[in-house]
Image: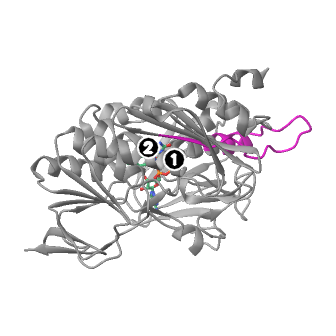
Amino acid sequence: NAAIVILGAGQGGFQAAASLREAGHAGPITLIGDEPGLPYQRPPLSKAYMKGDAGIEQIELRAAAFYADHAITLVEGRAVAIEREARRVRMEDGSVHSYAHLILATGARNRPLPVPGRELSGVYYLRTRADADVLKARLPAARHVVVIGAGFIGLEFAAVARALGHEVLVLEAAARPLARAVSTQMSAFFADEHRAMGVDLRCGAGVVGLVGEGGHVTGVSATDGTIHPADFVLVGIGVAPNVELAAEAGLEVSNGIVVDAHLATLDPAISALGDAVAYPSVHAGMMARLESVQNAVDQARSIAARLTGKVGPAGEPLPYTAVPWFWSDQADLKLQIVGIAGPTDLAVLRGDPASRRFSVFRFHERRLTAIESVNRPADHMLGRRLLAGTPRLTPEEAGDESFDLKSLLA
Ligand code: FAD
């Protein structure tokens, strides 16, 4: 019945609180977050919420009554220190929250664009509901929308802005969109689709500066010397994990708060999860820091299970081994990814991209590592089951549509 403090009231922090109660934790639970309002989901911010198809109630993880009913104390404010000796979290206003166990769920923040002109008005980022509200308010008056970065957030936003009738230019420094996340085949498909919907997508187009007049952005300078007109710029060039409090408290940090296979830090009284965390992934075969709802939610569940005493058949603590998966919605395309592929993993096509329903199966030394699917949820769901074990699928079978994938589950 020990007091548990959760630092960060986003996707993973919320889930940790909910799962602790579900698993029978009877002691106090305090959920600390620095964003105003109730914990909410981020994915709709660049999709239905941005488009106006979902309101605040639809994106909140639970209504206010849930927290009262489950005796979860929500604290709005910013934590400024973790005092490990005294086992307490110090807040900006000087107040403290004592813990028997602390769960760090501090997430990540946007990487600022590292070029001159970044301070101009009209340059936006998208991480929080507050960011989304600013974008939604300013977008209708925008004449030249430029998105910097063709990652998931940039492309999702571009699809919405286009659907709302805006001319959209996307500048990507890499040779292809979504380069860090998917195969070249999948990148090519998304590049074609965005161009078909009227997005002006330019790859190999680095940004060297922003220009402005009267303090407001008027253009984006690219590496080739072009200045693209812009009065609304969305920067989506990735995130940095929020690790500073952990590092200042002496916890190990290396591209994330370092945790072990049980998601514990080197301090047994502190666990960590979600976007902020680097963990030993059995699926990646190395330390990984993932940015997905699944990762935050499943890690929260795993920590809740451990803290409430759940063990394996021999009484051993259970390591975190969940299969990673992710989705992205762009216009009418649903991309789903399961597993983790290395950049050089073989890519085998199943189905015809022209039908807009296909998958790319990834293999490392003939071992299935990931499946990228577009509008083919059955392949994705099957992949989650296959990758939870030792998949026997060969590249030849994956590429042969007459081969019944379900036979592998028998
Ligand atoms: P977060 O949800 O970021 O929560 C961390 C919280 O901690 C934040 O509220 C932060 O302000 C707070 N915090 C940090 N430091 C302090 C402090 N010192 N004191 C108090 N509070 C603090 N994932 C998918 O799988 N599919 C998608 O389609 C998808 N779409 C996305 C779209 C957008 C626009 C964004 C931004 C993300 C999207 N994601 C998507 C990623 C997903 O939302 C994140 O991976 C997930 O939210 C991570 O959860 P988390 O709990 O680790 O961090």
Tell me the distance, in whole angstroms, between the alpha carbons under discs 2 and 1: 6 Å
Disc 2 and disc 1 in contact, CB within 8 angstroms: yes
Residue 206: image location, x then y, percent? 35, 70
**Dot 1: within a 10 Å radius of its alpha carbon, few (fewer than 14), some, or many (20 or more) residues?**
some
Give x and y (percent) for residue 212: 13, 73
At label 2, which amino acid type do we have? Phe
Q: Is residue 45 visible?
A: no
Above/below status of 76 relative to 258: above
Which quadrant of the figure contains the C terminus? top right
Vertical order, 184 against 87 (above or below): above
Judge from the rendering whether residue 274 lies leftward or rightward of residue 284; answer left or right.
Answer: left
Q: Which residue is mark 2?
A: 189
Q: Give the residue at the far left of this rendering.
A: 214
Q: Is residue 102 magenta?
A: no
Q: Secondary structure at mark 2?
A: helix
- 374 w.r.t. 192: above or below: above
Residue to which mark 1 is pinned: 185
Task: Indicate the secondary structure of the residue bearing disc 1.
Answer: helix
Amino acid at pointer 1: Gln
Give the dominant element type of the magenta stretch: helix, strand or loop: loop
Start and end of the magenta stretch?
300-327
Quarter-wise, where is residue 190 in the image? top left
Which class describes the residues within 10 Å of circle 2: few (<14), some (14-19), or many (20+)? some
What residue is rendered at 16% in x and 63% in y? 230
Between residue 24 and residue 287, name the one nearer to us.
287
Q: Could you say which is closer to the camera, residue 36 or residue 242? A: 242
Give the left or right position of residue 128, taking residue 264 as reference. left
Locate the N terminus by quadrant. Answer: top right
